[in-house]
Image (tube, rainbow, N blue to C red):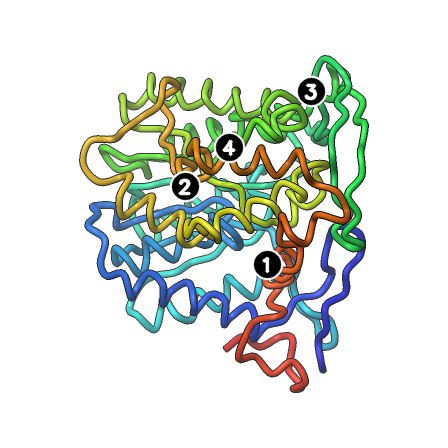
């Protein structure tokens, strides 16, 4: 079949196997060109391994540090005439290349919040790796069912305390407008913390520790985004900010149980993701950031950020902020970049958007998440949606 992108609202409902595989290969090439990364982390578990920062972590540790990995993600399998999710294709492409390089690559697909998947993962660690030296937590989901009581919680990305009025962007039409978002209720804020806070991270570490599959001196990292003051009203100071604060709490609890360097939250930069495209204000900021960082020569995607994390930030004595976080958002939040972003933000309108921001590249990066718009791929060719090169 010929697979084309089908956009519905903030999501793309199709994915291209060849495009996804090409994306994976290009990320591997980026790491390989930069050379080996010194690391003792040879047995790695990545929770949320199929896209973005999680996929990049699996690639960097495998092809930069010769690590064996187990990944966990929740994906849609293909049918004879129906494409899989992009993450499913990414997982298969990664496995093929990792195994060809002589590395172990095991992927478990299911609900990472569930006790069943935790048990399946522990069994795989015992069978394939014995123990793990590093646990990367990079799950992104709007919904979580608490395994203790079976209650399903849904996050609500809203301001907290009072309504917020700000600029926003319709990425389909290019229209810049003003939006007012009402504040979350206390119940919505609490549910967002349940879904996106640190509770499940703690449950994973406890389950792994109780099973004896955490190596002595292990480390766990949880990826977060703090962001610019331009997005703070809807993001950092909203319900998401409360969830992010809970990650700091969880990291401290894990350190108290396992050692001063056992757990750290890693603050990363803004990148184009399916999840962020649905958050008011954030896509407009993203189009602006793409333009400014490219002009300053500081553009980074997930693979660049994670390569810099492992190649630079995790080497030697860790440099931490006041909340014991590792910061890889330093380029985005540098004073010169934020000053330029703030200046342009005040001038943004539908008419000025093409000169001040880069909506075409934002759209291009969004489609690439699903394997479309990737150079060198023949999208007019018949492909079997069940086969990944």
- Do the CB atoms of the residues marked 3 and 2 lie less than 8 Å apart? no
C-alpha span from label 4 to label 3: 31 Å
Q: List the residue tagged with mark 1.
A: 365
Identify the secondary structure beneath mark 2: strand
Q: List the residue tagged with mark 2.
A: 136
- Do the CB atoms of the residues marked 2 and 4 lie less than 8 Å apart? no
Counting residues from the N terminus, which is met first, the one under dot 3 or under dot 2?
Answer: 2
Report which quarter residue 346 is drawn in: top right
- Do the CB atoms of the residues marked 4 and 3 lie less than 8 Å apart? no
Identify the secondary structure beneath mark 4: helix
The foreground one among 207 and 4 is: 4
Q: List the residue tagged with mark 3.
A: 189
C-alpha span from label 2 to label 4: 33 Å
From where the camera sits, is residue 148 visible?
A: no
Q: Position of residue 301 (x, y in %)?
A: 47, 52
Report which quarter residue 331 is drawn in: top left
- Do the CB atoms of the residues marked 3 and 1 lie less than 8 Å apart? no
C-alpha span from label 4 to label 1: 25 Å
Q: List the residue tagged with mark 4.
A: 339
Identify the secondary structure beneath mark 3: helix
Counting residues from the N terminus, which is met first, the one under dot 4 or under dot 1?
Answer: 4
Left or right, 260 with reference to 52: left
Q: Which is more foreground, mark 3 or mark 1?
A: 1
Q: Which is more foreground, mark 4 or mark 3?
A: 4
C-alpha span from label 1 to label 2: 24 Å
Q: Which is more foreground, mark 2 or mark 4?
A: 4
- Do the CB atoms of the residues marked 4 and 1 lie less than 8 Å apart? no
- Do the CB atoms of the residues marked 1 and 2 lie less than 8 Å apart? no
């Amino acid at each position: 079949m010929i697979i084309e992108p089908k956009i519905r609202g903030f999501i793309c409902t199709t994915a291209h196997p060849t495009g996804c595989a090409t994306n994976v290969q290009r990320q591997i090439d980026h790491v390989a060109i930069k050379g080996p990364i010194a690391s003792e982390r040879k047995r790695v578990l990545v929770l949320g391994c199929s896209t973005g920062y999680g996929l990049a972590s699996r690639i960097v540790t495998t092809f930069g540090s010769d690590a064996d990995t187990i990944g966990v993600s929740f994906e849609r399998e293909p049918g004879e005439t129906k494409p899989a999710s992009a993450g499913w294709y990414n997982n298969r492409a990664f496995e093929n290349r990792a195994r060809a390089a002589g590395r172990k690559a095991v992927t478990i697909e299911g609900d990472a919040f569930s006790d069943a998947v935790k048990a399946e993962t522990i069994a795989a660690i015992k069978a394939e790796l014995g123990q793990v030296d590093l646990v990367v937590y990079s799950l992104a989901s709007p919904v979580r069912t608490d395994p203790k009581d079976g209650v399903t919680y849904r996050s609500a990305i809203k301001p907290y305390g009072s309504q917020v009025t700000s600029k926003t962007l319709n990425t389909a039409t290019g229209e810049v407008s003003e939006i007012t978002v009402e504040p979350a209720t206390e119940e919505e804020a609490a549910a967002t913390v349940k879904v996106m806070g640190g509770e499940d991270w703690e449950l994973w570490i406890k389950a792994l520790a109780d099973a004896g599959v955490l190596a002595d001196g292990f480390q766990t990292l949880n990826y977060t985004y703090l962001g610019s003051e331009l997005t703070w009203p809807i993001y950092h100071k909203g319900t998401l900010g409360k969830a992010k604060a809970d990650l700091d709490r969880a990291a401290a609890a894990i350190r108290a149980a396992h050692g001063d360097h056992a757990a750290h939250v890693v603050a990363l930069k803004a990148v184009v993701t399916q999840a962020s495209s649905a958050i008011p204000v954030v896509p407009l900021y993203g189009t602006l950031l793409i333009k400014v960082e490219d002009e300053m020569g500081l553009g980074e995607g997930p693979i660049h950020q994670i390569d810099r994390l492992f190649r630079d930030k995790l080497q030697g004595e860790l440099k931490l902020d006041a909340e014991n976080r590792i910061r890889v958002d330093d380029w985005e939040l540098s004073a010169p970049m934020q000053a330029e972003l703030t200046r342009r933000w005040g001038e943004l309108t539908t008419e000025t958007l093409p000169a001040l921001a880069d909506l075409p590249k934002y759209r291009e990066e969004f489609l690439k998440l699903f394997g479309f718009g990737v150079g060198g791929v023949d999208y007019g060719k018949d492909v079997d949606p069940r086969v990944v090169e």
